[in-house]
Image (cartoon, coloured by chain):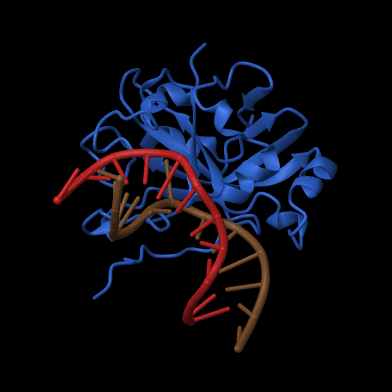
Chain colours: A blue, B brown, C red
Amino acid sequence: MTTPLDRPALDAAPLLLGAVFRSGGVAVRLTEVEAYLGEGRDSGSHAHRGMTPRNASMWGPPGTLYVYLSYGIHRCLNLVCGPEGSPSGVLLRGGEVVDGLDIARLRRPTARRDADLARGPGNLGTALGIELADNGSSIATPPFSLEFPIVPERRILSSPRVGVSGVAGTDAYPWRFYVDDPTVSAYRAAVSRRRP
DNA sequence: GTTACGATCAACT
DNA sequence: GTTGATCGTAACT
């Protein structure tokens, strides 16, 4: 069985829009994703400097979950893409909760609207109940599953990736893909935190 | 051992 | 629109 995840991340990312990612009792229809390319080809990728204990699962087979802690707080979720052995993946940045709304609301008590439940990568991880222990798991193994839409999304938009630093001429790399939907996070350019 | 900083969020003005 | 929270990670001494 081959899936879009067997393809390189840049090809797979737009195909993931509209797909339904399930983790236990909560399911999300993906509306916003970003592609991260393999070692050396993408200085914005966690894999850029080679394998470390944190990012090792990016070298796993397509369909592997790469979960990492962002800003010491948020659990962000990537799906590893092909070809096997290349550390590329797609960051899941936003989606619409289509099942398990009650559970997602409990996990995200500060969300003002249902559209905010899985809006932004950290929020999406929280709504789905993703844990660091899920790092390295397979999308094909319960409690996870991924279902692609019968009819692919038609109107796909793209932009540079959100908050990615370290890539010269970021505007030249529109590797964020999304659809027109209230569950898509706000665009923010990368900002350097360095003192002048 | 130490330190700078990040694929962010929510609260606040 | 701006800013503080918060801590694991990796680079560096």
Count of picture labels: 0
* Above or below for A150 versus A167: above
* Above or below for C2 versus B3: below
Horizontal side of A31 relative to A11 (left or right) equals right
Q: Identify the residue at image location x=56%, y=48%.
A: A74
- Residue placed most toward the observer, A168 or A73: A73
Horizontal side of A28 relative to A84 (left or right) equals right
Horizontal side of A81 relative to A101 (left or right) equals left
Q: Identify the residue at image location x=64%, y=29%.
A: A150
Horizontal side of A78 relative to A107 (left or right) equals left
Asked where in the image residue A160 lies, by quadrant, the reply is: bottom left
- Residue placed most toward the observer, C12 or A147: C12
List x then y, in percent, for residue A79: 49, 31
Q: Identify the residue at image location x=62%, y=16%.
A: A141
List x then y, in percent, for residue A97: 73, 44
Quarter of the image with the C terminus of chain A in it = bottom left
In the displayed image of the protein, which residue is found farthest to the right? A102
* Above or below for A28 versus C12: above
- Residue placed most toward the observer, A152 or A12: A12
Q: Identify the residue at image location x=35%, y=66%.
A: A191
* Above or below for A67 versus A109: above
List x then y, in percent, for residue C4: 53, 71
